[in-house]
Amino acid sequence: MSGCPSRKRSAPPDSIPESSDLPASPSWLERLANYWLHFDRFGWDVAGIFLLALALISLLGLVGKSWAPFQGAVLSPWITFLTRWLGWGSYVAVLAIAYGGFLALQRRTVRPMRIPLGHLLALEGAYFSLLALMAYFGGNLLSRAEAGLDGGIIGWGMAYLVGLLLPPPWSTVLLLLITLLLLAIGLGLTNWLGRWIEKQILASEGEENSISEEPDEKPLSEETIPATQTAGPDTKADSLSGLSTPPVRNPVLPPFNLLSNETSAHPDEAVIHDTAMLIEQTLAEFGIPARVVGYRVGPTVTQYAIEPGFVEKTGPDGNLVHQKVRVSQISALARDLALALSASRLRIEAPVPGRSYVGIEVPNPHTSLVRLRPVLESETFQKLTSPLAIALGKDVSGQPMVADLARMPHLLIAGTTGSGKSVCITALTTCLLMNNTPQQLRIAMLDPKMVELVRFNGVPHLLGKVETEQERMLGVLKWALMEMDNRYRLLEEAHARDLVTFNRKQERKKLPTLPRIVLIIDELADLMMTSPEQTEHSLVRLAQLARATGIHLVVATQRPSTDVVTGLIKANFPARVSFAVASSVDSRVILDTGGAETLLGHGDMLFIDPEVGSPQRAQGVLVTDAEVEKLVTFWQKSAVQGPAEAAPWEELVAIEGDKSDEMLDQAIQLVKRTQRASASLLQRRLRIGYPRAARLLDELEAAGVVGPSVGSGKDREVLLPNDDDEEDDEEGMQDYNKEI
Ligand SMILES: Nc1ncnc2c1ncn2[C@@H]1O[C@H](COP(=O)(O)OP(=O)(O)OP(=O)(O)O)[C@@H](O)[C@H]1O
């Protein structure tokens, strides 16, 4: 039904022309299909009650064979048939019928238990060999079998056949072994034993070699979903990280075995099939025909691919037309599906970009931790060949999700408290430290939370120490701006377009190269609260211009509101990661679309890659304290240690601390608003004396807000744009939020 295209029902070719306007009657096949669809809703209940009743009557018939009330035209032949063919095994058959009825009744209310076909066949095999065993124990006499004793005629026949192969008592021993083996297979004991043995072997081989992860895509019915855009078609081998050839590594860099390997939990295939069935059932109950055509298993969620079916509608001309179900109808049922699947949160991707199906992401019963090592070793990561390649996590099909910070060129991270921002920043920093020497990369870290990033103190890549005081952080931003201007001058002198070209030229001339710089801020909100103008101005200028000079920003915040993530900041940070947020409004502030409010926390993220556009879901990498410690120790031991370097912004911080005027923010605002900058204007508007106004002007010049002096009494050039654009932007944002 669901696969047929939309079409009009046509009248028979030879019918009267006028009658073509009348709706043609449906064919017998369609009528039968319709009846079945209606019947299907109650069919399981009817079948369940019938089977339970049959089991009960059969049991009574077996127990009271010779009792008059249980003799009858239908019951007696049925009981005779059972006992004659199955002997004492009829009781087991009756129990099986009752169990079948119980499963059929359960089907509409709770998730029914599914027995794999192999197990079912093994159980049947065990049953028949048990009948043969019973026949042996009764002396294997046909007369007893015909009287309904031992294993019945079937048991007798099987015992007879086995007896032709092996003489007793070996035939009995063989049958006993076969029965036990088939029973063990049918009850799943062999699987359990296999897993246990595998675990023991892995444990004895040690953690180092323990990973041999299998690809997670498995066929559900005939089709499976192809891999995601990030992973690419040839990345299946990535997940076999333990088996693939390890990449050749620069011996100067830390070895991969500093990092832990991962052991992933694979969700039960039966659970996946049950969930798929429940999704189809729930949608059908809401009148939406749809089919689950595949699934992808990720570390946190499993994505089910739903192919919308067709519904019959009467068109304006009265004809019946087949209309495809609208995807919005499916996404509107997110809460009902979550209820039916007993899921805490559920995300619907309607449709999955570039595919012809809707993705329903259901949380896994057990989440797997994603470790850095398998992602670093994966082919997807190796293919990036960029020193600033970063491992973000694994996507909904368990494939590594990686990105290149050099191309982004800056990253904005948001999420509520405890959603995984700091863990993400730690993973990202670890990744950069794994792939760069201190000569190639320097990192500056600002951490107002004071506890998360201080673990990196002492690593030779770090400029100064991790800054935790607000007053010093503004000095760092100011230094970054100065460093950028400095680098631009150097690039200009060397006639180089960017840092890569500049370094290449320097290497050719055997001159020192410049390292890349990554500036990491773990909480933007604090900075924006204390000094909004200066912070925003510095960040925006860096974000707009710093890329060519090899300076990149990674900024995180737990307050995704428009006063922290302003329109200007957003516009300059196209690459964004959102962890779980409180509402869809917050999600829109970060991602420009909803969805982050349905994330599960603990590293579950949506990533917007400017080159892809739509948000991609992933489970973030988790790096442990022990791994960071090992890495820091490695670099401390291997890098040539000079005398402890003072932070390059020390001088600026001192000036800032001594001289910075608390009116600087007001002065910036005034200058931006009026687009004029002179000491007399500042004196008049801010009600201050000349010396303070002159000093403020100097500070404005140092901060890059106004140009140099152009003669006494003349206004200086204002380097910042008028606030109007920004106001428009913010007003637009407010209107947008109101609309939401
Ligand atoms: N990728 C991950 N895998 C597994 N667990 C994670 C992951 N990321 C975070 N968690 C869990 O979530 C907890 C909180 O993470 P984290 O400290 O990064 O949150 P946060 O967003 O920085 O919070 P805050 O803003 O309050 O500092 C961690 O202690 C860890 O238990």
Image (cartoon, rainbow, N blue to C red):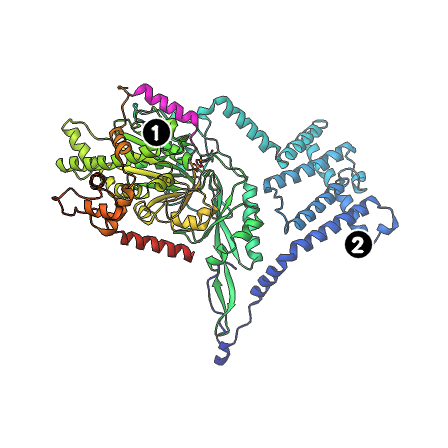
**SS at circle 1:** loop
Give the image location of residue 181, x and y in percent.
64, 32
Where on the image, by quarter, is ligand 1? top left
Query: Which residue does the numbered mark 2 point to in the structure image?
Result: 74
Q: Is residue 623 magenta?
A: yes
Asked if one can make out residue 160 in the rendered structure from this viewpoint, the answer is: no
Callout 1 amino acid: Val
Q: Earlier in the sequence, mark 2 or mark 1?
A: 2
Say which quarter of the image contains residue 693: top left
**SS at circle 2:** loop
If the image is split into quadrants, where does the C terminus sit? bottom left
Q: Residue at x 69, y 38 (%)?
A: 127
Asked if one can make out residue 579 in the rendered structure from this viewpoint, the answer is: yes
Say which quarter of the image contains residue 438: top left
Q: Is residue 163 magenta?
A: no
Q: On screen, 568 above or below 285?
A: above
Distance of label 2 from label 1 (alpha carbons): 87 Å
Left or right of 367: which side holds 476?
left
Left or right of 712: which side holds 410?
right
Callout 2 amino acid: Val
Q: Residue furthest left?
A: 711
Residue 362 or 738: which is nearer the viewer? 738
* Ligand 1 is within 8 Å of the C-beta of the residue at disc 1: no
Query: Which residue does the numbered mark 1 point to in the structure image?
Result: 466
Q: Determine contact: label 2, label 1, CB under 8 Å.
A: no
Disc 2 versus disc 1: nearer the observer: 1
- Which span of residues is magenta-colored? 621-639
